[in-house]
Every structure is written in C-alpha cells, then in structure tokens.
Image (spheres, helix red, strand yellow):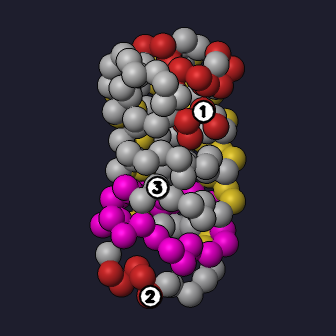
Amino acid sequence: LSGRVPLDLEYIMSRIEVSISNNYLTGELPSFSERGSDIFSHDQTDVRIDRIDLSSNRLRGWIPSGFGEMITLRHLKLSHNMLSGTIVDLGNLTSLESLNLENNKLVGSIPRTLPSSLKSLDLQNNKLVGSIPRTLPSSLKFFDLGQNSVTSVIPTEIGYL
C-alpha cells in the first residue's frame, strides 16, 4: 500500500482489528475527534476496537487525542514512523495491554498516568525527557525506554518487573 491514510479510517476501525503495517502510508494519523469522539464512548456497545497496528509506515505528525478515548483498545502499535509531539493521555484506556511507540520522534515526558492493565510499554528510540514515573502499573512486564534522554533515578518499583 502507498498513499495517505484514509480520513474515514475510524469508521473501518470501529468494526474490525486493523493492521496496516509495513507499507508506505504517508501523512498524518486521522483525528478521530474531528468526526465525533462519541463513537468511542461507553454508550456505544457496537464498538469493539481491540488492536491497531500502523507500524513501519511513513506517518508523521502528532498522535491524535482521540486514541485516548478508544476504551476497548487493547493493543496499539505505532512504531517505526515519524510521529512527533507528546504522548497523548492514555489513562482512561482501562483495557490497554500493550503500547509500542518505539522509533518515532516523540518528545516530552512519559505520561504520569498509565493504564493499570498495561503489560508492555515500548518507548525506545524517541526524544523523551524527564523522569520515569514513580508509580508504574503492577501488571507491567516489559518496559523499554532505551535511547531517550530521560535523566532520573530508576525507581525501585522497576525491579519488580
């Protein structure tokens, strides 16, 4: 595949798992909130988004805040793109188990609030700064923060991973 990501991708994703990795998709990720973020609300029982994999493309720009509203999302993989900006607030994603944002150009700090269900967090090779949150989800089993500019003492809680 090549070309831009379809603007109506959120409608497709509300019905199936999406894996469009290892292609030549360009442009920015669709802004899910532009078309009404209510499609991701608790009242929408027909929305069952489990997995999104848009890794290894040529996507750029910010991660839209609408990703933080996808309450049924369990796996999000946006690695190996050219995404920039900060990591959106994902604290409301109570089902999220894995988040892979490695090899992008993300800046800012690691979000202070991470989903309690999170088992795998891969943020390596970005431009993140600041400190590692002192409280990490007890469910976390994998955490990669290599090749960033985080400057802090490693919390003792990481020893329990």
| Residue 130 spot, x, y in % from top left | 67, 72
* Disc on the earlier residue, 3 or 1: 1
| Residue 10 spot, x, y in % from top left | 51, 19
Residue that mark 3 sits on: 115
Q: What residue is shown at x 64% (from left), y 19% (from top)?
A: 36
Q: Amino acid at mark 3?
A: Pro
Looking at the rendering, the stretch of residues picked out in magenta corresponds to: 117-142
With 135 as the anchor, is 159 left or right in this view? left
Q: Which circle marks residue 156 in the picture? A: 2
Q: What residue is shown at x 47% (from left), y 45% (from top)?
A: 93
Q: Amino acid at mark 2?
A: Thr
Could you tell me which secondary element the residue under label 3 belongs to? loop
With 81 as the anchor, is 107 left or right in this view? right
Q: Amino acid at mark 1?
A: Gly
Residues under labels 2 and 3: Cα distance? 19 Å
* Disc on the earlier residue, 2 or 1: 1
Residues under labels 2 and 1: Cα distance? 33 Å
Q: What residue is shown at x 60% (from left), y 32% (from top)?
A: 66
Q: What residue is shown at x 32% (from left), y 75% (from top)?
A: 161
Residue 29 versus residue 160: which sits nearer the camera?
160
Q: Is residue 107 magenta?
A: no
